[in-house]
Image (cartoon, rainbow, N blue to C red):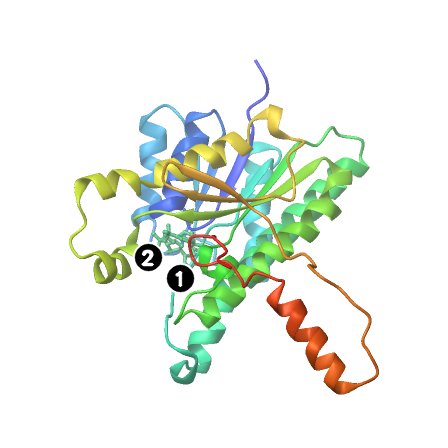
């Protein structure tokens, strides 16, 4: 039997993180279940659920926005289980407002939890993986980060959240290149699921949520893809963004240059050239990820 692997899942007390923690535990990982709150809060319940199913889990109440605390979080995995193999940076909050109404705190809190909270845990894990690789170990690590359709395609009222989530997608592409030499893949997931975060907005758009819709938006659909990314035979897959909307999965592909041209000297000619390049380039995709001419 292969040695047990260890996973850290941030924001694992509820919603998607809970589903990831349960799926990774069912796949044989020892799981550090990280979330804010008391020992007997939601994350403690996830630890108990994993243990009662015969799995191994440890509670972490570290705040992902705290650099020193996330060093302890990675240390907890290494000290308890002898190493760390998987990090799922999932913790998240929303502070939706239009740009003109957004407060400084709305901006700072969202950037801190998502963008900094991905960097902190990924940084300490990367330092651990680099040290193991330099010591000659065969590292087979996974970094899985969380973006959003909002960050990839843009959504009104979420300039803070979209900026953080777009930043996380870009961060992951860089991490994939930097971590590859150590034997670690880095991929990003853009989930859609019914959770505490999305229940209220979904009700506003769709009204009462039917059982069929609940089943379609079950976080377990996303957890299947996360668990797949942690299988031994997916170690070569890196630098990808997976859009998972219930049973529907897509690969999001990033910015690329369409027409390029050399600037003419004359400003009117530049105007014509830019307008024709714009006309030849489809606009950004909508929230479904589709581009319309
Ligand atoms: N649900 C969706 O459809 C959807 C869509 C796109 C992206 N996402 C992303 O998926 C992730 C999970 O969201 P969810 O829908 O499961 O939400 P959720 O609210 O159910 O769970 C998020 C968890 O993160 C925890 N958390 C918040 N701040 C934290 C901190 N500083 N340190 C540690 N934990 C913290 C919360 O306590 C909560 O338990 C988030 O990054 C979210 O932005 C979700």
**Farthest residue toward the top?**
1
Residue visible at 31% across and 27% down in the picture: 52
Residue 238 drawn at (x, y percent) = 65, 39
Does residue 209 appear left or right of residue 280 in this picture? left
Residue 120 visible, this angle = no
- Residue 87 higher or lower than 163, as above or below: above
**Badges 2 and 1: C-beta atoms under 8 Å apart?**
yes
- Residue 74 higher or lower than 171, as above or below: above
Point out the image quarter for the N terminus.
top right
- Residue 161 higher or lower than 76, as above or below: below
Residue 28 drawn at (x, y percent) = 48, 24
Does residue 173 appear left or right of residue 162 in this picture? right
Residue visible at 75% across and 42% down in the picture: 131
For label 2, the crowd category at 10 Å Cα-Cα, with few meaning under 14, some 14 to 19 and many 20 or more, is some
- Residue 116 higher or lower than 43, as above or below: below
Q: Nearer the viewer, residue 215 or 276?
A: 276
SS class of the residue under badge 1? loop
Residue 163 drawn at (x, y percent) = 53, 67
Q: Nearer the viewer, residue 39 or 290?
A: 290
Among the 4 quarters of the image, the one containing residue 25: top left
Say whether mark 2 is within 8 Å of ligand 1: yes
The residue at which mark 1 appears reads as: 93
Does residue 227 appear left or right of residue 218 in this picture? right
Say whether mark 1 is within 8 Å of ligand 1: yes
Q: Which mark is residue 197?
A: 2
SS class of the residue under badge 2? helix
Residue visible at 73% across and 28% down in the picture: 138
For the residues labelled 2 and 1, the Cα–Cα distance comes to: 7 Å
């Amino acid at each position: 039997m292969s040695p047990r692997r260890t996973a850290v899942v941030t924001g694992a007390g509820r919603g998607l993180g809970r589903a990831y923690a349960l799926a990774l535990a069912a796949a044989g990982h020892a799981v550090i279940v990280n979330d804010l709150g008391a020992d007997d809060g939601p994350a403690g319940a996830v630890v108990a659920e994993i243990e009662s199913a015969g799995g191994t889990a440890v509670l972490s109440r570290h705040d992902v926005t705290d650099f020193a605390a996330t060093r302890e979080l990675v240390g907890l995995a290494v000290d308890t289980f002898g190493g760390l193999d998987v990090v799922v940076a999932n913790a998240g909050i929303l502070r939706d407002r239009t740009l003109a109404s957004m407060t400084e705190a709305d901006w700072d809190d969202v950037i801190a939890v998502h963008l900094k909270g991905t960097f902190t845990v990924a940084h300490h894990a990367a330092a651990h993986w680099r040290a193991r690789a330099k010591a000659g170990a065969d590292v087979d690590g996974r970094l899985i980060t969380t973006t959003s359709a909002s960050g990839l395609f843009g959504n009104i009222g979420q300039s803070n959240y979209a900026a953080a989530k777009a930043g996380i997608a870009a961060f992951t592409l860089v991490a994939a290149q930097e971590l590859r030499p150590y034997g670690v893949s880095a991929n990003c997931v853009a989930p859609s699921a019914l959770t505490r975060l999305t229940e209220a907005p979904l009700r506003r758009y769709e009204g009462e949520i039917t059982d069929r819709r609940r089943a379609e938006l079950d976080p377990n659909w996303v957890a299947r893809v996360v668990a797949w990314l942690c299988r031994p035979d997916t170690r070569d897959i890196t630098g990808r963004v997976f859009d998972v909307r219930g049973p529907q999965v897509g690969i999001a592909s990033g910015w690329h240059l369409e027409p390029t041209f050399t600037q003419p000297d004359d400003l009117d000619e530049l105007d014509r050239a830019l307008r024709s390049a714009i006309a030849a380039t489809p606009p950004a995709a909508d929230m479904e990820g589709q581009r319309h001419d």
